[in-house]
Amino acid sequence: MFANVHPLGFLAAAKARDAEQLIGQTEQLVTALAPSEADLKPAEAVLAAAKSLYDAQEYSRAVAQAKRAAALATSLNERFTAYMAAWKFLQACREELQQIGFPTDGLESALESADKEVVRPVEEGGTLVPNYLGATERLERATEEARTVVARAREASREIFLATLAAEALSDSPSAPTSTWLAVRLEPMLEQAARELALGHAPAAFKIASEARVRSEDALAGAARAWELVDLAAAVLEGLEADVRVAEPLEEKVESARDALARGFLDRTSALAVANRVSDEVAAFAKHYPPARDALERTKSVYVRLQEDGFCSYDVDSALSEARGALARGDWNVVQEKVESASEIFLRLWSNQEALGQALAEIEERVALLAAFRLPLLPDVQQTLDRAKGEVRSGRLAGAQEDLLIARALMMQATRTGS
């Protein structure tokens, strides 16, 4: 098209060369931008007008149109790039929400509206151009809302995922309740959270899932703690080596607590309440039973030794019998009371034995002093003293007291006879 240039003056030739060069550069620019998929037809039309003006030797106008075509092509490409960036971002948001299970009607509507806005041309400087600017503005407005929606949907979806993992961990744990508790309490909550998310109610879905997760984690921790308390109570009870009759009621309670936990019908509060109750009872038993048992055993040992010496007491027998019954019932106060009662009898016995022993020793000393006189009644006195000492050792203090009086009377008679 540039072959037939009319011979003009030097100035006209320079304008022609400038116009020809600018039109060529603009054409190269439009060709280079063509692969971007931007609609460059308006720029191509302006460029065609520049060529027509060049052919008409209207070089100044041709240059102006070529510049306008270049600027328009660059601007359309930039607008298209911005439009596509916004469109792709919104499309990515839509796809992510679809994967999450969140409704995307609003985003799809925004994308369709933007596409329609693009093909609805607007006039710029007498040229109709695709409305990339208007479409981009529409997409950007939707993008701001999409960011908030996606963030909430992500948060809700993640919470549902964590709640599901927590529920599975609770179901799989050997120390957790069985699936009965899980099915009754947790599965409906997880299903409701998923429904709320599918309906587009992200905050509600998050709240329900969060509550389910907390319940699962709480139940798992509570179940583990409850089993730990019950197992510890069983170990403590076993370590005490208590009499079967005494420990059997508590052992039954421990087994009952284990059975209740294993059935899985208890929530965290109830499970811990059962475990704590058994643990507290065993702890109280462990605190009071050994001292009460040992005190009773010590009292029985003392009584056995006294019985070997011939001592026997109905009151002690009765106190020890009642103490054994109280020990079996776990009535520690009665055990202490009866042990103390028997101990007081022993103390009185030992006190009286000491007093009688001293009195008998005094008479024996006098018998020893009078032995050289060979008084006729001294052998009877000694025999009575020996019998009294045996009665003191055996705890028959009444007999010992009577023999003490006899020995004193014989001693006085022997002394008068000797005089």
Image (spheres, rainbow, N blue to C red):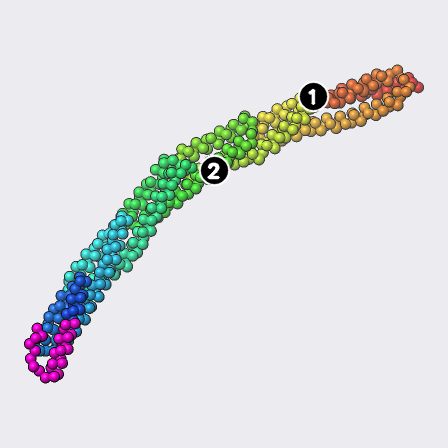
The residue located at (25%, 55%) in the rendering is: 92
Could you say where residue 156 lies in the image, as x and y percent from the top left? 32, 49
Could you say where residue 123 lies in the image, as x and y percent from the top left? 15, 68
Q: Amino acid at mark 1?
A: Glu
Of all residues, the one furthest to the right in this rendering is 419
2 or 1: tag closer to the N-terminus: 2
**Around disc 1, counting alpha carbons within 10 Å, would you say few (fewer than 14), some (14 to 19), or many (20 or more)?**
few
Q: Is residue 332 above or below residue 390?
A: below
Tag 1's secondary structure? helix
**Nearer to the camera, 52 or 214:** 52
Task: State the count of labels.
Answer: 2
Q: Is residue 121 magenta?
A: no
Q: Principal SS element in the magenta part?
A: helix
Could you say where residue 310 lies in the image, as x and y percent from the top left? 71, 20
Could you say where residue 374 lies in the image, as x and y percent from the top left? 90, 17
**Nearer to the camera, 324 or 40:** 40
Q: Write the start and end of the magenta stretch as one range.
A: 1-25
Q: Which mark is residue 228?
A: 2
Q: Where, quadrant-wise, is the C terminus in this rendering?
A: top right
**Nearer to the camera, 196 or 372:** 372
Specify whether 309 is left or right of 118.
right
Q: Which image quadrant for residue 89? A: bottom left
Q: Where, quadrant-wise, is the N terminus in this rendering?
A: bottom left
- Label 1 near label 2: C-beta < 8 Å? no
Q: Which image quadrant for residue 343? A: top right
Q: Amino acid at mark 2?
A: Glu
The residue located at (24%, 60%) in the rendering is: 86
Q: Does residue 212 show up? A: no
Q: Which mark is residue 308?
A: 1
Specify whether 384 is left or right of 221.
right
The residue located at (78%, 27%) in the rendering is: 355
